Image: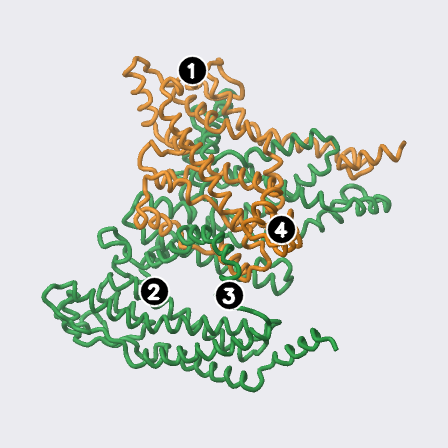
Chain colours: A orange, B green
Amino acid sequence: MKNDEEKVVFKGGTKIRKGASGVTFDIIKYGLLTIASIICVIPFILVISGSFSQNDIIMREGYGILPKAFTVEAYEAIFKYPQEILNAYKMTIYYTVVGTAVGLAVIVLTAYVISRKTFKYRNTVSFLIYFTTIFGGGMVPWYLMYTTILGLKGSTFIIWFPAIMTPFFVILMRTFITGSVPDAIIESAKIDGAGEGRILLSIVLPVLGPGLATVGLFLALGYWNDWYRSSLFSTSKATYELQFYLYNLINSAKALQEMADAGATVGVIDVPSQTTKLAMAVVTTGPVLLFYPFVQKYFVSGITIGAVKG
Amino acid sequence: MNTAAASKSLATSLNRPVGSRRFGLLIALGASVLILLLTLPLLDWISISNASKVAKSLGIEGNKLSKVGAKTHYSVLLFLDFVQKTKAGLLGFPAALLLMACVASLVLNVMFIIKLIINKPNKKGYLGVFVNAKGAYILTIISALGTFAYCMYANHTVEALKKKTTIGNAFRPTWVVIVVLVIAILAYVLIKIMEAQERKLYHEHGLLREIKKNWILFIFFFFCFVYFLINNYLPMSGIYFAFTQFNFRDGLFSSPFIGMKNFEYLVRADLWKLTRNTILYNIVFITLGNTLQIFFAILVSQCGVKWFKRVSQTLLLMPHFVSYVILKVLVYNILEYDIGVINSAIAASGGTRIDFYNTPAYWPFLITFFNLWKGLGYGTVVYLATIMGISDEYYEAAKIDGANIFQQIRYITLPLLKPTFIILLLYAIGGIFKGQFELFWQMVGNNGMLFNVTDILDTYVYRVTISQPMNMGLSTAAGLYQSVFGLIVVVVTNAIIKHNNAEYALF
């Protein structure tokens, strides 16, 4: 009986028998972890409760941890004239879906190529891909390449294309492929007459689910959280990414004034200036935080594999 | 008789250059030395006749090249000097490309010579050496042919500048170029022949055979190739902008070439401050970040209560998932003077408000805090994975010997975390010239009050590019400085690591 009990405890991860030092350590570890967790979460709570506060009171008394005079006026203000934010939402979803899909396809193809031991130039190719992380022309040539030379400024293509792959994702995917399909299986399929395309489609892809999920989520998160490319390449609000829309909103009192003016023409004058920013932040990041608990394990596996073997 | 073993011993004996191969390699060595001597700026590759007409076309006062200090004979390595002195921006970029090819051929030739002198063939015999030699000769051929092409281009371009002046074939390649071209072609053919023999020995094949055999893999790879070409490799040619007085009127690659002037300006202005900030912040991030991450990874791993472990890990990782724009909102919400959480609390308890956004002294701490805040969960997951991989047996044995929990951490967990720590540290050191652009930009943005302690190379480049398009040459120079020193740091770190402990090496 006693042995069984101990075994269960080990499974749970506790690797100590409780002594005096064990108890002290218990208090320290649970205490510190609780404090750290609270510090990590509290800014979110501040923003959420701020977004449900009344703007007038905020202007007088400032923000607090709990909502001051609970109201949804900030959300009403946003969604009274929702065209712009809905468009930003729509565009961001478009960028995320297209970018992730194209990116995954290219990453899988590349990772497959450099995972094949019979491919003579796999080391050369791997190095050329890796080299881009240690040396580059810098931001200006990159920017001019897309804008002046390719003339893509203002298009939607340019928002998603530059982020379809990174060396890290390729290496990560290669690790997933070599981890889930032993070389011997591929070789025997080759001997049986399967071509590379056939091997990729019917042997590698079916077992690559976790890899696709992990890299796909990394890509999708990157697209959802990006504001940088819009700030460089967008020429009109029609192509704004959601984060850049929010960035503009919080950066300029002017943007808020425009919102107020749009309201004024139809009779609404008050746009709650401060709480609207927070409500926008909540609306923008809501989907990420809603999905987060469900997809967390894929991220964790990606981080782990990427760090250890990348 | 074991034929495999026999052929292996044959191969080993052939690893020493014998007979015809030794002779061939000697000739190649001679060719490389000759190319080296002919390419070095002792001899001129380009001569300019009709100097006065050229000067007139280029709009030089008095129609004399010597007025601006330009000469009539140039080594291809120094030709950019002519471009700079005569302010012939149009001639700059091709000359820079030519220079690159030439320098690359010199480097490869030197490498080839060194390899032959050291004479240490690897398990594929001399194939690696041959690849090096082929590269060297191809680049030499490109340099020589490029010089011909460049002279034609220069004649054409300079003539087009002034309608009424004809300069004829003013820019001419000298005899040296022809000699170099012939030597390089002959040496290339020689190496090809020797390589074909060597390949038979090791059952190797070349690019064409590989394409025929694995053509579908080349198609798979094509998309990746296009992407990195557009996104990374072609933009590298834009490094040239760093040496020009960039402006859109003259055109991307034809703005006036000004040599190192941009760098001189940067050194006089902000470079020291930017470098200091970038590196110091990174050092603080690396030390504090890793310490905290290891600390919390150990704490989480020691949690017996499963739900607590899961919840705390989820919460710690949460900041990683929000964008930096959201971070900006959070920071603003907390620090704002009138309504921020901290100042509201201070005001409510009767204290004086703190003007964070106008007081530089707070910002190194604030930026560090939010960096740690955002990165804590990620690093914790990484270290936690390593800790979970440690076998229970170590701890069992330690417990039997009476080690308490702190001793177990000190003598088992920490030593076994060392490899992970070193790998992460290496990556971080490699990136020490790269700042956390999004963090700094979103927290500070255009707030000039704080630049002295918060401006890093990345924010500087972005700000200049966005707000002063006329100074793009300057921001390219800053970016190039960052790239080059970043590369040097990576290569040096890697070399040191490789020397001490090869398994940790990055490449």
Residue identifier under label 4: A178
Q: Are marks 2 and 3 on the same chain?
A: yes
Which chain is disc 3 placed on?
A: B
Of A63 and A128, which appears nearest the observer?
A128
Question: To which residue does mark 2 refer?
Answer: B97
The answer, for residue A31, to whether it is visible in the render is yes
Mark 3 is on which residue type?
A: Arg
Please name the amino acid that badge 1 sits on.
Answer: Glu
Q: Amino acid at mark 2?
A: Leu
User: Which residue was labeled with disc 3?
Assistant: B209
Please identify, in this view, whether the residue under mark 4 or under mark 1 is nearer the observer. 4
Residue A4 in the image: x percent, y percent?
86, 34
Q: Are marks 4 and 3 on the same chain?
A: no
Q: Nearer the viewer, mark 2 or mark 4?
A: 4
Q: Position of residue A134 (x, y in %)?
A: 49, 55
Which quadrant is home to the C terminus of chain B?
bottom right
Q: Which quadrant of the view contains residue A280?
A: top left
User: Which secondary structure, mark 1?
Assistant: helix
